[in-house]
Amino acid sequence: MAVDDPGTGNPDDKPHARDLADAFKVLSDANRLRILFHLATDTSGTLGVSDLASRIGISQPAVSQHLKLLKSDGLVEATRVGFHVYFTLNRTRMFCIAEMFDQMRTTVLSRCNQQLIREKNPEGPLNIGIIYYSYSGITRSLMEQIHAVCGGDLIEVQTLKKYRSFTAFTTGCIRSRNEETDQITPAVIDVSSYDLLVIASPVWAWKPAPAANSLVSGLFGCSGKKAVICVTYCSNPGNCLPILKKKMESRGVEVVNQSSFSHRDTEDPQRVMELIRTIIGAYQV
Ligand SMILES: Cc1cc2nc3c(=O)[nH]c(=O)nc-3n(C[C@H](O)[C@H](O)[C@H](O)COP(=O)(O)O)c2cc1C
């Protein structure tokens, strides 16, 4: 039976490990796995015993028996509608199981990346300047993930006059649409000693936030440097990346890679690892 509190998804936690082991016992049958696969890929939400039996090619009593076990572990849920009983996957339970593998995959990938970094730069962490603006923390969290793996300097610029949510969507958006700058601190960032720059901004009104425009203008010693640029957005990044790229190029910087991250992407270890690998790939001493 599934534990009530899925907890941290960490199998090092005893009750959780037992719970996962129970789930794997139930899953250790080819027909039950096939039933789960059909339930997972079905979009109708109306699969019953007879549908599953005909899809899998086993008898209805056998399917019922398998479903009983899957239900007892909380992997599958049943809904009665009149005379029919429909089966669906228990998403919470599946997420809980997947989370354990996600955690392990993230750790393994992170170690692989650390190894790549050591190969690229045996001296130590990458000598990169990770410079960004973040209004609500999404870009910050992405850049912190990059910094945790790649090392280097993490520099956040802030506006001297803080935006409230109303002024961000009024004044801020007008300023970003006009590609204006804000007063920021630090106003000037000396990047002459870095081997690679990582520059990031949130999308405001489909363009870089005004503070990011100031950030680019305030780079000192950037001519001839290489940069990876990155923007985070909610639903539509618009022209933010090409505009940021152009601004960087006007400062003599070569933009070697660019990527945009939706909110979901910033929490997807695979996407974050892709960005890290891009940075490692672009790094040249
Ligand atoms: C003033 C303002 C304007 C925004 N405009 C856009 C937009 O045009 N397109 C979009 O997809 N997201 C837009 N967003 C959402 C942000 O780009 C998104 O939430 C971003 O990840 C926030 O990053 P941050 O937390 O580092 O500030 C806007 C957010 C704000 C505050």
Image (cartoon, rainbow, N blue to C red):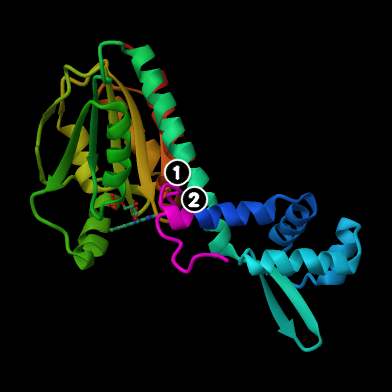
Residue visible at 10% across and 46% down in the picture: 183
Cβ atoms at labels 2 and 1 below 8 Å apart: yes
Amino acid marked by disc 1: Gln
- State the image quarter where residue 223 is shown: top left
Q: Is residue 278 visible?
A: no
Q: What stretch is highlighted in magenta?
A: 1-16
Q: Where 109 sits versus 91, above or below?
A: above
Q: In which quarter of the image is residue 234?
A: bottom left
What residue is drawn where x is 41% and y is 19%?
Answer: 116
Answer few, some or many: residues within 10 Å of disc 2's Cα (few below 14, many 20 plus, some between 14 and 19): some
Verify whether residue 10 appears in magenta. yes
In the image, is residue 120 above or below residue 130? above
| Residue with the mark numbered 2 | 99
Residue 184, x across and y down, in percent: 11, 44
Q: In this view, does 82 lie to the left or right of 14?
A: right
Q: Which of 216 and 90 is in front in this view?
A: 90
Which quarter of the figure has residue 194?
Answer: top left
User: Residue 11: x percent and y percent?
Assistant: 46, 48
The location of residue 153, given as percent across then percent down, is 19, 29
Q: Position of residue 262 (x, y in %)?
A: 43, 49
**Is the CB of the residue bearing disc 2 within 8 angstroms of ligand 1?**
no
Question: Does dot 2 land on a helix, a strand or a loop?
Answer: helix
* CA distance for labels 2 and 1: 6 Å
Which numbered dot is residue 103?
Answer: 1
Helix, strand or loop under label 1: helix
Magenta stretch, main secondary structure class? loop
Residue drawn where x is 31% and y is 13% of the image: 121
Label 1 CA crowd tier, 10 Å (few <14, some 14–19, many 20+):
some
- Tell whether position 138 is magenta: no
